[in-house]
Image: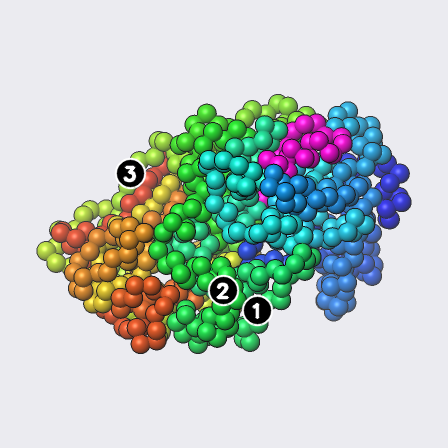
Amino acid sequence: MGSGDLARGRAIAGVYPRPVTRPLPASSLLSPALSLPALFALSGLGCALTCAGCTSTTPPPVTASPVCVDADPAEEAPAVALDAEAQAEADEAARVEWIRGHYDKREVRIPMRDGKTLFTAVYTPKASWREALDAELGEGHERLPILLFRTPYRVAPYGEDEFPAKLGPHEQMLRDGYIFAYQDVRGRFMSEGEFVNMTPHVDDKKSDADIDESSDTFDTVEWLLANVEGHNGRVGQWGISYPGFYSAAGMVEAHPALVAVSPQAPIADWWYDDFHHNGAFFLPHLFNFIASFGVVREELTTEWPPRFQHGTPDGYQFFLDLGPVANANARHFHGSIPFWNEVVAHPNYDDFWQARNLIPHLREVAPAVLTVGGWYDAEDLYGPLAIHAAIERQDPDSRNTLVMGPWRHGGWARGDGDHLGDAHFGSPTSLHYRPFVERRFFAVELEHPSARDYAECGALPTAYVFETGAMRWRQFDTWPPKDASAGALYLGAGTGDRLTPHGSLVAKAPTERKAFESFTSDPAYPVPFTTDVDKGMTREYMTDDQRFASRRPDVLTYVSDPLDAPLTLAGPVDAQLWVSTSQRDADWVVKLIDVYPGDAEDHEHLARGQHMGGAQMMVRSEVLRGRFRDDPSQPKPFVPNKATELTVHLQDVLHTFAPGHRVMIQIQSTWFPLMDRNPQSWVENIYEAEAEDFVTAEHRVYRDAKHPSVIRFSTLPTPALDVELGEGIGALRCGPG
């Protein structure tokens, strides 16, 4: 069907029955620029157009498989494989034509208070379609809210006669009909001005020259209200990852018309998100991203710089061959990437990084806020938790909801969300989130006509959180839950069990006079973070089976007895360790792992050769660069061989260890190439370490009466899994159809 057919006013509800309960092609579900290093569109597969029994629809047909339902898979598979790429292209082309037939596009330059202009593409539902929506669904579509998306990743396609294959947070909101405004942020692509990474917020603006992302958002909203017809005076904003930061920054000193904001996987502080984790440098994540993103723009452009060519798919070998971090400039960047230069010039949490911390500025947040994150977000787990907590603490009267699902980075906006890697979640969590949480939030807060679908619904809970392990949603009045009880597991002696070659996890504090485990850490042979061959940070590593690591001699393993009853951890997890090193610096990686019983059943999503029997599924992991154990701004060497206390904050979880499972803790000092290698000798600026600075060291982890190493957490009573779910337990179901 072409744009002429669509323009005759056919109501979109006739094309898509409400609600969407099946997965749409992945190409329709992506929001722009979901990931920092993954900047290029994905596409989904429908059934091949040439298959017998396939029917053509606009938008393209929804299928779970590229094989037609009435075809013999064995006979049709070769043709399907050949036609898959063509089908994906046809799906995307059909969506482009659908949007062209329903939306008008206008490209504008919006002036900021300092005189610079920001390139913005505005998509407005056609008048004929608004009339059709009124006729089909009820009145109210003559004036619609505006949804703003600000991005450093470009708002392609450029040109008023060029249309994208997707608009809005997801497909269902596209067909509801919003006014969408997409903007290149200051200094990126077609927008004027100077781009500054994680633009520091200016609290005291003395003149029009004092600009930041808050002021640019304010000026954008002001212009849209004055120059876009057919709006209802209410504006929302959303974004994932870096655009999530722009959303969070936009709600500081917000325009009065900006009434609903959803920072999703937002960056809050780059000392704890993305490229740093408690001071440890996530090397491939920044290297791969900044090699393209960080290239200096010489003039306004619509094109990306070329991607970096590693010359191999093996990231472990590439970054091992790179040697010290200083070689990145010497061999590859040659000083041409300004932000890389800034990172390596600021190895500590100094004024440069502190100025880029958004958290202190989240005061008097006027818009309603829906902060979204994924428990398995390898890039920005800290951001959503910290932003939600900051608003609760600094603006307790705000309407502030946190959603944490079992997702990877941006996983709620694409795919089904029923599994990640080898972890299975029991239901399509992403398909649930979109209509029952995200669509509801924006429809109600922006007074969109679709809010009538939620007329009988109350307010969203303060925290709507997926309980991994138990595979269910839970609702809380606060996060972390206020009725959680303190719990602890101490590192103890090994029992001779094959799973406890090093030690055990026990409820009682140790009484031994002197006890420890030791291992040799050699930067030349670092522990891999995954068994996958990949150039960067894999999206599945946070759910990977850790059996490969527990078999390394430089990984300490502590395991509990099989549980007699379920154990539910809710909220922060901290590893309070007593350690020592024979050198003067060390990194400390701690993993919380759910060990499945040997007879655990497999599920359909396992990769070839993988089994759940005896699986060591990672629940949470984190690292502390030891020099920052007391103060991230004041690095301090270890005294060789002296027992020293430190705490590794593993961030939050909501996870239930089932009866028969075991709790495991792994401790190691390398995690490569996910994080850079610590030379272990003392170097003032670790990024200036030379090859001869990298030395082996003996590390110890103590577990005696004077030096009790302990894992601290909070627990909740675990509702039975086989009873009808009561209030506060289970998925939100109030909404359409």
Residue 227 is inside the magenta segment: yes
What residue did someone put label 1 on? 308
* Distance from Cα at disc 3 to Cα at disc 2: 40 Å
For label 2, the SS is helix
What residue did someone put label 2 on? 287
Mark drawn on residue 486: 3
Name of the residue lying farthest toward the left = 513
For label 1, the SS is loop
* Distance from Cα at disc 3 to Cα at disc 1: 47 Å
Q: Position of residue 451 (x, y in %)?
A: 66, 27
Q: Position of residue 348 (x, y in %)?
A: 35, 55
* Residues shaded magenta: 218-240
Q: Earlier in the sequence, mark 1 or mark 2?
A: 2
Q: Which residue type does callout 1 highlight?
A: Phe
Residue 440, compared with residue 74, is above or below; it is above
> What's the residue at 18%, 61% (across, down)?
639
Label 1: few (<14), some (14–19) or many (≥20) C-alpha neighbours in 10 Å:
few
Q: Earlier in the sequence, mark 3 or mark 2?
A: 2
Quadrant holding the C terminus: top right
Mark 3 or 2, closer to the camera: 2
* Distance from Cα at disc 1 to Cα at disc 2: 9 Å
